[in-house]
Image: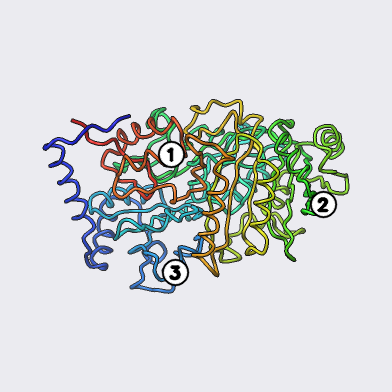
Amino acid sequence: MRVSKSSPSISYILFLALYFSFYTITPISSNSLQKNFINCLQKNTHVDFPLEETFFTPERNASTFIKVLESTAQNYRFVNNSTPKPSFIFTPVHEAHVQASVICSKKLGIHLRVRSGGHDFEAVSYVSQIEIPFFLLDLSKLRQISVDIEDNSAWVQAGATLGEVYYRIAEKSKIHGFPGGLCSTVGIGGYITGGGYGALMRKYGLAADNVLDAKIVDANGKLLDRRSMGEDMFWAIRGGGGGSFGVILAWKLKLVPVPETLTIFSVTKTLKQDPDFKTLSKWQRVADKLVEELFIRVVISDIGNKTVAASYKGQFLGEKGTLIEIMKRDFPELGLTEKDCTEMRWIESILFHDELPEGTPIEVLIQERSPLVKLSFKSKGDIAKKPIPALVLKGIFKRLIQQEPFTFLVFTPYGGMMAKISESEIPFPHRGGTIFKIVYNVDTGKRPRTQIKWIRELYSFMTPYVSSNPRQAYVNHRDLDLGQNTTSNFENAQLWGAEYYKGNFERLVRIKSKVDPCNIFRHEQSIPTLPVQS
């Protein structure tokens, strides 16, 4: 995809585009903005909305506004006095309210951001660093879940959390599940737009691989399903990243079979216990080749007293006796014993992966939970195509000594079903040839500048040992260091677009240009429209 050279006519068009973009963000009275939006909403929806319960402004009640804003803000690096705040927050209680919000955003020239669970690593779902004023469309009140066991499916509204989805499935069946994520408070609306991985990915693929239908509000405020949106748009929203094509209202999920009993385990190896990295090196060689029913990720962190350890956290879709036999045959270096293993139901394994205290009732999954700890962090990611040498692993461990508590690396294994699906099946391209995914995470609470410098240096250190041309990344682990849009900068987007989507980026841009030519849905790393060509 090439950008043609500018001609005088193109320059004039670009001048007009810039002029009107500046015009639409010229500051106006906040009260006037809110009044105009409310009036527009009332004219464009047939469903009433109680203002006291759905519309929040700092002028009306500052404490309530901040409470709603922070209710699902998962990264407190973006919750401070210097971070741009929305002019107002609207929490729709009906699909028609979302349609009206999009219509009014377009008509009044007010930029919108859309949040379902607030887990975006760079907070682009609720913070705009490039465009003000803006408002926040918070979908947290749209969280209905309808499970149909006979049809092996479930309709789930965008504001529901993964934990709620898992609970409602388990409420109906002990032998049905869904291949979603490990963190139960993630909102399902945005989660699936990036692909969505979890402990069942080696058996069933990503969450986005298991979507049957969707409801979305497009740039014209129309409510569409799979049939009316068309297969191109349906392809794009399952892995093409959130906030680019419309507002996801609901997903129809394909449920998958799970055994009544599965086995989980956690084994920790310190550097003293694995001085030559034989265990971690063996994990790299076998993690993507183990039976599909077995998922073992590795969390590397400082566990205190200048001790860095690798924790092997596993899940097996079966009983522990069978698991022990497999491990003795394929990964004896870990030294897994029956004492390390616990058999449980699939729904109980969700609590294990969420690292909730032992004995926590599963009902916690359907309780509204604000973050227990106000974490400030910066994350980066990589895709590993070959094992990382032991000397490099030693360098990683050395860098982690005496780091802050929430600083860690996670190695997540691929293979199995992940390797069987084509990289163009959906926009998520990291399939065959991928051994594991890496997440680097640093706690930025006390020393943000120092800590961000630390993680960038670690990322640079890892350059020779991870994927290249392009150096790949997972869009749900968003990293604005890779590049940002200013308005709709296509050339800049090509760089980070290739890292997230590889060859799928060009198709995403074509679809975006077709379904949202005016770029209503935009943020720092949204899919851009095609540039004007002569």
Kindly give the residue lying farthest to the front in the view shown.
391
User: As shown in the figure, which amino acid type bears the numbered disc 2?
Assistant: Gln
Q: Is residue 370 in view?
A: no
What element does badge 2 sit on?
loop
Measuring from the top left, give residue 134's x and y in whole percent: 32, 58
Nearest to viewer (mark 2 / mark 3): 2
Measuring from the top left, give residue 198's x and y in whole percent: 63, 42
The numbered mark, 3 or 1, whose residue comes first in the sequence reads 3
User: As shown in the figure, which amino acid type bears the numbered disc 1?
Assistant: Lys
Is residue 31 rendered to the left or right of residue 507? left
Mark-to-mark CA distance, 2 and 3: 42 Å
Is residue 372 rendered to the left or right of residue 33? right
Taking the spot 52% from the left edge, 64% from the top edge, the residue there is 450
What label sits on residue 273 in the rendered view? 2
> Can you identify the residue that label 3 sits on?
80
Is residue 97 rendered to the left or right of residue 106? right
> Can you identify the residue that label 1 sits on?
215
The numbered mark, 2 or 3, whose residue comes first in the sequence reads 3
Q: What's the colour scheme? A: rainbow
Q: Quadrant of residue 181?
A: top right
What element does badge 1 sit on?
strand
Taking the spot 65% from the left edge, 40% from the top edge, the residue there is 388
Measuring from the top left, give residue 310's x and y in whole percent: 73, 51
> Badge 1 local density, few (<14 within 10 Å), some, or many (20+)?
many
Mark-to-mark CA distance, 2 and 1: 51 Å
Taking the spot 31% from the left edge, 40% from the top edge, the residue there is 490
Taking the spot 33% from the left edge, 29% from the top edge, the residue there is 1
> Badge 2 local density, few (<14 within 10 Å), some, or many (20+)?
few
